[in-house]
Image: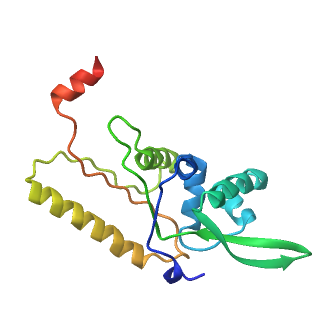
Amino acid sequence: MPTDDLPETFHVTTDEQLRAVSNLTRHRIMAVLRFEPATITQIAERVGLAKGSSSYHVRLLERAGLVKVVRTRKVRGVTERYYAMAARAIVLPDPGEGGPDVLMRHAVADLEAAPADGERHVRMAHLRLTEEQFAELGARLEALADEYRELSDPSLPDASLVFALFHPASREQAEGDAK
């Protein structure tokens, strides 16, 4: 299924959908399906799961509407299903004050699981920006991510890009939360 046929975004709005994307294993399955359809067997091999576990997680994602069957074929009398993402991007609701940011937690878990001897580019910078500069930087980062997503080739190894541009809690807020 060409990714041109996919809707641009899928907005997570229900508790069932939020529970589905909040699981690290399902997050990794969605990463496998990001560029090309795959069977349960292919997903299990890529994520390092047993086929039964892979099937369970894919069924939950399918029930939540995040992935869908895009093609089937008969193999030795068994119907093999190919799954793909339901949209190019998944948009999560704002976690709200004090809520966990699911995407950042998954990104950190993926970074920690990545081979330590592999090439990585990780950087944190503290900036002082006007509101206009803040908005411009956010727009530029999103445009850069979109540009490279368009260049992605499913035959190449996976790479993940995560960025967070935010105003940290004020010192008074942070001290109040620590009490």
- How many marks are shown on the rendered structure? 0
Which residue extends farthest front?
14
Which residue extends farthest top?
179
Classify residue 29 as left or right of residue 11. right
Classify residue 43 as left or right of residue 35. right
Q: Which quadrant of the figure has residue 171?
A: top left
When the figure is inspected, residue 23 is found, relative to residue 178, above or below; the finding is below
Q: Which quadrant of the figure has residue 44?
A: bottom right
Q: Residue at x 57, y 55 (%)?
A: 28
Residue 115 coordinates in the image, percent (x, y): 51, 50
Q: Residue at x 85, y 78 (%)?
A: 74
Quarter of the rendering occupied by the C terminus: top left
Residue 83 coordinates in the image, percent (x, y): 66, 69
Camera-side residue of 148 and 65? 65
Which residue extends farthest right?
77
Q: Residue at x 72, y 52 (%)?
A: 56
When the figure is inspected, residue 172 is found, relative to residue 151, above or below; the finding is above
Camera-side residue of 48 and 137? 137
Classify residue 108 as left or right of residue 96. right
When the figure is inspected, residue 20 is found, relative to residue 135, above or below; the finding is above
